């Protein structure tokens, strides 16, 4: 969202007032800076209006009188304020009416339009007929615009923390590629200029520019953006490679199979965009209340005009109808949500929860499923040595790790990284080190020949091993490597992803809240089932691609509200599609920017804190909306003169006091939000 970045046309785009966080109504987007400027200018214009104009026809102790041309000065100031400060509301109302969903913007616009044009009429009539004494509403016009702009600014400031998901995705792809020319030399060109069949060189530690197939070389690619798993994948001639994958070991050439705009990452971008745009259709609680008030005020105002015109004439009826429309203006209602949001986001930030899309939290009571990525969400997201088994007394477990790490020195493979992180101190010197693509690594330590091999390489060389030992590790979902000394297995190493400390309790607590946990992963089914069983998750979906995750989110949404928790590129479309998307903070920028909430501390249990806060905030919002709407529900019929036959009419001072009280109650109630 960096200062309302272009991508945020999508992210928080709840196009009715529920998106007054973003001031995006009917497609209109207000910059944060523009909003501040409008508020400052409006407040400056409001000060002389308040000093020179009575409130609801009533002079206040500080009201200045006797200034030459006073009424015309107020008209000029009020006109500037109306057309300048009111623009966001007019645009918003237009969008709401075009979508046939009148809500907050329409209600505000109705109030300030009626207030302005009636005040214009009052000023002119009072000038022509000095004894007309027609009451104007410039005081109410100015304060309403200021309060509503302030409400929007509070909420925008509270939620504008996200970046652009699509921009983050684009950053995963290099801007240029090394294309082979006719003279066999390579030239750097923008990836958009690559054609199908072009030959491209991908150097070590560079990202693959576009989707294609390996032509020469046997690279190990980090395809975690596709699978969510950080295990390096060995590629051979003819194998498919995905744009955005990281080449972690050796240069290779590839042929272009898809142009940049048609590749995997482009499809992910489209999925994110589509899901976020679909999310804009949601209507928030404040919209619904404002919509009801709009219809109520319109009906009551027209009835009052007609009835009192019949009884006492148009001149008597018009001020009553105008008062109805102006009293309907939602001063307290406009602050009901923003004040709770400001409080909510402040408390949440202290707990490491960054709320990027507040309206999504309103879905919290409807959540029935928690779909979550395995790697990085429930597990630590990095390979670690989980178990070391020895087959002989000749070497200890520590010696096996030391030897294996020594053989892997200089390699960038995830297994090598994991082994090197496990050992301390100086490693044995390895001579004649050789990496065998797809098999492992060999070398001489002193007079002994060692090899660190995977299972297929062991079979290929006819080296015997104890199957039960292998099975005991493989059944846990571990990747298994064998340390071989002179063609004899001396140790077996199981590497895997460790379950996060609080993951088990997190799953149990979700179930206690009647939310069903569902595991989604790009990993193989065996590894996924092992983790799921340890955590108590019954529903597991493995071998998934990004589009599969989106499809599953959509499928579960047909049965109830869905929360998606993830951290990888492959999770971002699903995060955007879900009713509530939660990103684990240690993940990629893409996933973080596609989510509604980010967990900075990367602890699954923080989701429970989020749900608790969201439930409390939802209650506060509902209470505030009742307080805000309650004033209108009482004041509208009284302003319409429903009790006038028995001599009771809403006194302007009483109306102003009621309005102020409801606003104060709303503010105090918002401040009572606490983390329990």
Image (cartoon, helix red, strand yellow):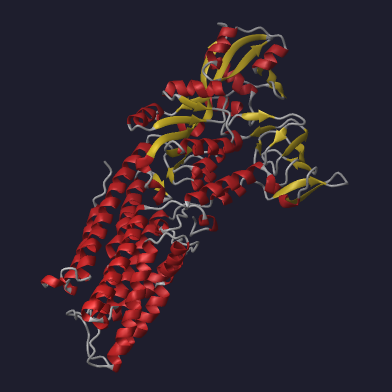
Tell me if 55 is positioned left or right of 505 in this view: left
Residue at the spot 38% in from the left edge and 76% down from the top edge? 82
Which one is nearer the viewer's eye here, 270 or 243? Answer: 270
Residue 665 location, x and y as percent? 21, 58
Which one is nearer the viewer's eye here, 59 or 156? Answer: 59
The image quarter in which residue 127 lies: bottom left
Residue 334 location, x and y as percent? 32, 62
Which one is nearer the viewer's eye here, 83 or 486? Answer: 83
Residue 588 location, x and y as percent? 53, 42
The image quarter in which residue 508 lies: top left
Question: Residue furthest toward the front?
Answer: 310
The image quarter in which residue 14 lies: bottom left
Compared to 153, does 43 lie above or below? below
Tell me if 167 is positioned left or right of 611 in this view: right
Q: Is residue 135 shown to the viewer in this render?
A: no
Q: Is residue 147 shown to the viewer in this render?
A: yes
């Amino acid at each position: 969202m960096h200062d309302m970045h272009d991508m945020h046309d999508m992210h928080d785009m709840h196009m009715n007032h529920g998106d007054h966080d973003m001031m995006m109504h009917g497609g209109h987007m207000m910059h944060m800076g523009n909003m501040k400027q409008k508020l400052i200018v409006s407040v400056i214009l409001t000060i002389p209006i308040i000093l020179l104009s009575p409130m609801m026809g009533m002079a206040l102790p500080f009201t200045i009188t006797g200034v030459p041309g006073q009424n015309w000065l107020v008209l000029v100031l009020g006109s500037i304020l109306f057309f300048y400060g009111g623009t966001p509301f007019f645009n918003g109302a237009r969008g709401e009416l075009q979508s046939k969903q009148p809500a907050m913007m329409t209600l505000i616009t109705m109030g300030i339009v009626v207030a302005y044009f009636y005040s214009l009429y009052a000023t002119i009539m009072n000038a022509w007929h000095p004894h007309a004494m027609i009451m104007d509403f410039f005081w109410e016009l100015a304060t309403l615009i200021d309060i509503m702009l302030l409400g929007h600014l509070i909420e925008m400031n509270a939620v504008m923390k996200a970046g652009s998901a699509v921009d983050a995705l684009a950053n995963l792809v290099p801007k240029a590629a090394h294309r082979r020319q006719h003279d066999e030399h390579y030239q750097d060109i923008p990836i958009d200029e690559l054609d199908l069949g072009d030959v491209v060189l991908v150097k070590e530690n560079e990202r693959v520019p576009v989707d294609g197939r390996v032509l020469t070389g046997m690279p190990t690619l980090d395809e975690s953006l596709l699978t969510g798993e950080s295990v390096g994948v060995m590629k051979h001639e003819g194998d498919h490679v995905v744009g955005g994958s990281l080449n972690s070991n050796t240069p290779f050439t590839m042929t272009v199979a898809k142009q940049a705009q048609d590749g995997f990452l482009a499809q992910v971008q489209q999925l994110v965009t589509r899901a976020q745009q679909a999310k804009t259709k949601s209507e928030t609680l404040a919209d619904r209340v404002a919509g009801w008030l709009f219809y109520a005020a319109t009906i009551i105002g027209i009835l009052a005009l007609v009835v009192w015109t019949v009884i006492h004439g148009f001149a008597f009826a018009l001020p009553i109808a105008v008062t109805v429309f102006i009293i309907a203006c939602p001063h307290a209602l406009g602050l009901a949500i923003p004040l709770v949001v400001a409080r909510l986001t402040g408390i949440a930030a202290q707990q490491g929860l960054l709320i990027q899309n507040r309206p999504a939290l309103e879905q919290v009571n409807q959540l029935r499923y928690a779909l979550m990525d395995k790697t990085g969400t429930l597990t630590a997201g990095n390979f670690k040595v989980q178990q070391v088994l020895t087959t002989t007394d000749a070497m200890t477990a520590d010696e096996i790790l030391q030897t294996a790490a020594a053989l892997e020195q200089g390699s960038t493979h995830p297994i090598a990284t994991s082994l090197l992180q496990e050992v301390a101190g100086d490693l044995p010197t390895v001579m004649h080190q050789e990496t065998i693509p797809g098999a492992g690594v060999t070398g001489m330590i002193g007079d002994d020949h060692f090899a660190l091999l995977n299972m297929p390489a062991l079979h290929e060389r006819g080296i015997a091993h104890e199957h039960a030992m292998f099975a005991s590790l493989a059944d846990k979902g571990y990747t298994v490597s064998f340390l071989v000394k002179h063609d004899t297995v001396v140790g077996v190493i199981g590497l895997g992803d460790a379950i996060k400390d609080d993951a088990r309790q997190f799953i149990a607590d979700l179930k206690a809240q009647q939310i069903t946990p569902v595991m989604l992963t790009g990993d193989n089914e065996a590894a996924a089932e092992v983790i799921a069983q340890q955590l108590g998750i019954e529903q597991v979906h493995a071998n998934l691609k990004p589009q599969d995750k989106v499809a599953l989110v959509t499928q579960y949404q047909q049965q109830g509200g869905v929360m998606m928790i993830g951290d990888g590129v492959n999770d971002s479309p699903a995060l955007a599609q879900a009713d509530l998307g939660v990103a684990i903070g240690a993940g990629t920028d893409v996933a973080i920017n596609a989510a509604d909430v980010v967990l900075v501390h990367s602890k699954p249990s923080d989701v429970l804190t989020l749900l608790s806060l969201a439930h409390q905030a939802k209650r506060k919002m509902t209470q505030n909306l009742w307080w805000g709407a309650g004033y209108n529900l009482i004041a509208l019929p009284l302003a319409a003169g429903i009790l006038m036959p028995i001599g009771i009419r809403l006194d302007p001072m009483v109306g102003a006091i009621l309005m102020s009280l409801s606003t104060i109650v709303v503010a105090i109630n918002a401040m009572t939000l606490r983390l329990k």
